[in-house]
Each structure stands twice: as structure tokens, then as C-alpha cells.
Image: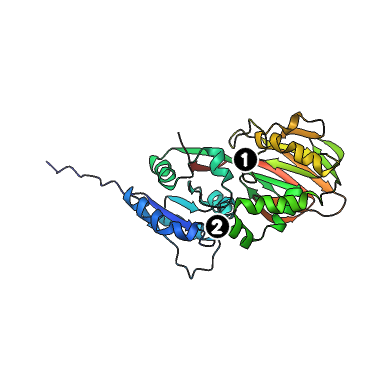
């Protein structure tokens, strides 16, 4: 009789991408490595000399790993999105960045040990991604005030001031905000508007804790849209509590709806912000990519 072969269970192997330039990324490296290996994960860290973006790295290492772990904020996740879609590898999020809105949307803990426990537990949640002019986003894409804020916030000020940096830059810009003319096209209808901002959300949170819509979920198959059609900057201040709760759609000067695609034209070109990064200028063509990637998330 032949001896029974015992199949050794191969440990999971993760590609670890750390944004060393982020506010806390460099400090987190050693602790992350220690905790991941303690959980039985094999870890590959790309050599520092590799001049590749996150998505290129993901595709380069795809045949050697079974998951990707990103240590960084929403900008880092955004950079990894095309590679995750191309390879189908699941994503683990360790969120020590300036803004961790995607982690907040999924209920991923900010505490490193707890976030690693979520990855180790293995529960994968399929999530949608938004797309604007071919560029993917996790949380929100916007035109107007938020895009001007993204231009104002340098990487250095994010690193130095963190959340306070957002507040300081926002206060300065708020008083300079003026409505602009645009056209919103969806479901075959073109509507002319005057607004200070339009936001198109995939997840619930953005901008350090603002909410696109109170019931928005990153796997509901919808883009949630709102445009702020206010005329004075002080009306924006009055809206802040509603923006934090995601109930701004109740205001008369706020247009809000859900859709799977839309086009925004502006009279003159305006910057487009996606997950805090400027990715181009209007016109902006939006669509949703349903169940585009899988993310390790609380069960």
C-alpha cells in the first residue's frame, strides 16, 4: 500500500507597497513587516531602486503573490487601482495616510494591529470603482471647490500639517469660491447649472470624513452625485454639518441623484480631482465599474 502524501499548506504571499513619503509610512514599515510575518504571511517588498509605479509593480509581481497590501492613504490606493483590476489580486489596506476615507467606508480599523487582523482573517468584499475619463477612483471625483483644494494642498503641506492642512487651505479657498457654468448630462437629459462644486462618489466618505450620501456603499452599483448650486461662500459654511452626515441633498440649493454614468461639460476647462489627485480637465465622462476588485474587509 502506498504511503499517503501530506499536502503542505503554502503560506499566503503578499506584495507590500508602502508609501515611504506619506506622513507615517516610513515609520510603519518595520512594525508592519513584523506583524504580517507573525500572522504567517510571506512578504515581498519591491527593491527601492525600482522606478515603477504601484500598478506596474503589481503586474510585475503578480505571478509571485496572491494579494497586495498597500500602506498609505487614498492617493496610494488610487495609484494601485489599475494594477489590481488588471491582475484580479485582492487588496489589503493598512491606512496610515493623511486621508483614509476608503478604509473608513469599509470599516477597516485605523489601528495597525486590528487592520492586519482583518487581512489575516481572509474575508474579501467585492467593491465597485468609479471611472472618470478612463481614470479609476475609489471614493470620489469632483470638479470645482474640491479640485481647487487638491491643487492648493502640496504633498509637503499634507505631510507637515495632516488634517489641519485641509482645514487651513479650505478656509482660504472658501472665500475665493465663485459659481461656474456647467452642463450635467445623464439618462439622455442635459441640464444647465451654476455651481461651486459637483461631486461624483463611489464610496461613502471623502475629503477627510465628508460623506457623499448617507446611505452610499462602495458595492451598491451606483455613483452618488451632488452639485452645490449656492451663490455665496457663507452658504457653503452652513452646509458643512450636512456634508459630514451626507444629508446635503435635502437642501434646495443642492442637486442630488444616483446614476451609473454621466457627463459634465463646463464653459471653460476645469480641473478634475479623483481621490485627492488632479487627473485632467473637463469635459468629464463618468461611469461605474461594478465589483471591479476584492478588498479584505471586516466580515
Q: Nearer the viewer, residue 215 or 149?
A: 149
Q: Is residue 276 left or right of residue 25?
A: right
Q: Total of numbered circles in the picture? A: 2
Residue 149 drawn at (x, y percent): 72, 53
Kindly tell me whether residue 133 is visible in this rendering. Answer: no
Among numbered discs 1 and 2, the one appearing first in the sequence: 2
Q: Is residue 289 left or right of residue 281?
A: left
Q: Is residue 215 left or right of residue 84?
A: right
- Is 61 drawn above or below residue 9 in the view shown? below
Q: Nearer the viewer, residue 65 or 170?
A: 170
For disc 1, the neighbor class at 10 Å (few under 14, some 14 to 19, many from 20) is: many
For disc 2, the neighbor class at 10 Å (few under 14, some 14 to 19, many from 20) is: some
Any mark on residue 205, and which? 1
Residue 38 drawn at (x, y percent): 32, 50
Q: Nearer the viewer, residue 298 or 183?
A: 298
Residue that badge 2 annotates: 55
Amino acid at each position: 500500500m502506498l504511503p499517503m502524501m501530506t499536502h503542505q499548506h503554502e503560506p499566503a504571499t503578499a506584495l507590500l507597497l508602502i508609501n515611504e513619503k506619506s506622513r507615517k509610512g516610513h515609520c510603519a514599515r518595520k512594525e508592519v513587516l513584523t506583524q504580517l510575518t507573525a500572522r504567517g504571511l510571506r512578504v515581498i517588498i519591491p527593491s527601492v531602486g525600482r522606478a515603477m509605479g504601484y500598478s506596474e509593480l503589481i503586474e510585475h509581481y503578480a505571478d509571485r503573490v496572491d494579494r497586495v497590501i498597500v500602506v498609505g492613504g487614498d492617493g496610494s490606493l488610487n495609484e494601485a487601482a489599475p494594477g489590481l483590476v488588471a491582475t484580479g489580486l485582492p487588496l489589503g489596506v493598512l491606512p496610515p495616510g493623511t486621508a483614509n476615507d476608503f478604509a473608513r467606508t469599509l470599516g477597516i480599523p485605523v489601528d495597525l494591529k486590528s487592520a492586519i487582523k482583518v487581512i489575516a482573517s481572509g474575508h474579501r468584499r467585492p467593491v465597485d470603482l468609479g471611472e472618470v475619463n478612463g481614470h479609476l477612483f475609489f471614493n470620489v471625483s469632483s470638479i470645482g471647490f474640491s479640485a481647487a483644494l487638491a491643487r492648493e494642498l502640496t504633498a509637503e503641506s499634507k505631510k507637515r500639517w495632516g488634517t489641519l492642512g485641509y482645514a487651513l487651505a479650505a478656509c482660504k479657498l472658501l472665500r475665493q469660491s465663485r459659481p461656474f457654468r456647467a452642463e450635467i448630462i445623464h439618462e439622455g437629459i442635459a441640464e444647465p447649472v451654476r455651481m461651486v462644486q459637483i461631486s461624483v462618489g463611489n464610496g461613502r466618505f471623502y475629503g477627510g470624513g465628508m460623506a457623499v450620501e448617507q446611505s452610499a456603499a462602495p458595492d451598491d452599483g451606483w455613483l452618488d452625485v451632488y452639485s452645490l448650486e449656492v451663490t455665496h461662500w457663507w452658504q457653503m459654511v452652513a452646509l458643512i454639518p450636512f456634508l459630514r452626515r451626507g444629508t446635503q441633498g435635502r437642501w434646495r440649493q443642492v442637486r442630488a441623484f444616483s446614476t451609473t454614468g454621466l457627463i459634465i461639460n463646463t464653459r471653460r476647462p476645469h480641473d478634475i480631482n479623483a481621490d485627492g489627485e488632479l487627473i485632467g480637465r473637463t469635459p468629464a465622462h463618468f461611469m461605474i465599474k461594478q465589483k471591479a476588485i476584492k478588498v479584505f474587509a471586516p466580515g
